[in-house]
Image (cartoon, rainbow, N blue to C red):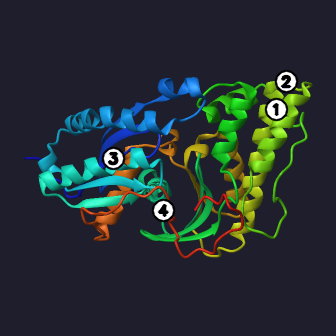
Amino acid sequence: MMTSAFPRILGLESSCDETAAAVVDGGRTILSHRLAGQEAAHRPFGGVVPEIAARAHVEALIPLVEAALGDAGLTLAQIDAIAATAGPGLIGGVMVGLVTGKALAHAAGKPLIAVNHLEGHALSPRLADPDLAFPYLLLLVSGGHCQLLLVEGVGRYRRLATTIDDAAGEAFDKTAKLLGLGFPGGPAVEAAARSGDPKAVRLPRPLVGSAEPHFSFAGLKSAVLRARDAGIHRPEDIAASFQQAVVDCLLDRTRRALGRCPGVTALVVAGGVAANGAVRAALERLAREHDLRFTAPPLWLCTDNAAMIAWAGAERHGAGLFDPLDVPARARWPLDPDAEKARGAGVKA
């Protein structure tokens, strides 16, 4: 039987439209990772259909678990704990992954670790960067969330800002749909922007310069719609101008948050939008301005994956944080439940 000085964690991810299983150990070694995407199933609808996503998770997850264990050369009995995303996300998909994790944990007599998907993103930079120490300022920017968090330790997060309406990633997806660029939207907009002029279209920068700490992107989406309907701009120019507007908003809000976080070791970006090259480059420049280390996970670790869930499980395992088998699945699950509520009915907690 294989032995290891580090706990080996099986991670499961199914919160949106990616089904994934991975084995990671506490020494930051990714022993295996298997992922099944659903782009083809959702492309005709221009976005993720929750019911289709949940059914696809049911079909894909167990074969992925078997493949991930096989790739790692391990049996379920040799795994030290099962980590599964328990929220936030599309509740049908979250339930598929969490119930599967519970069943595997119960059958193998292993501890269960219910991972907050946002914590997976928040800790994923530490999987790729062993020198990244707490505390650090995290810009968590994805399709469903846009937050600035002070990451003080495992399970210790202080939310400094959030979106009062839409997330940046959602704005990318809607812009791609408006411009007919295809699905998934984020990469499509970035690709179009490479051949566009970021100064061609005058677009707003919501809340830039405001004393309010939060983000807003709904007005920017509306401005893209008006620019498209004007019929005088190339889609590539609208895409480039939109992307630059998002970068400007992220930089302004992050710069403001840095002023409230003396003593942080690094500026960190994670989440699906962190895969955007323009966003990463701008934030890296901002970190240099403040003499801070800049850390971003490899591109594949920015989007939804099971390695980050397994790593969050390893971090929680090291802290002795486990969960009972009746832990619930949650559509919403804030990392900082004590954060002051931001204005706006559409706040992404």
For the question of whether residue 196 can be seen, the reply is: no
Question: Residue 290 appears at what percent x and percent y?
Answer: 71, 64
* Extreme residue in the left direction: 1
Tell which circle, 1 or 3, labels the residue nearer the N-terminal end: 3
Q: Which of 342 and 36 is in front in this view?
A: 342
- Residue identifier under label 2: 234
Give the structural element (helix, strand or loop) at label 3: helix
Question: Residue 295 appears at what percent x and percent y?
Answer: 56, 54
Report the Cα–Cα distance between label 2 and label 4. Answer: 40 Å
Question: Residue 228 appears at what percent x and percent y?
Answer: 84, 30
Report the Cα–Cα distance between label 2 and label 1. Answer: 6 Å
Give the structural element (helix, strand or loop) at label 4: loop
Q: Nearer the viewer, mark 1 or mark 4?
A: 4
Tell which circle, 1 or 4, labels the residue nearer the N-terminal end: 1
Question: Residue 61 appears at what percent x and percent y?
Answer: 30, 37
For the question of whether residue 92 can be seen, the reply is: yes
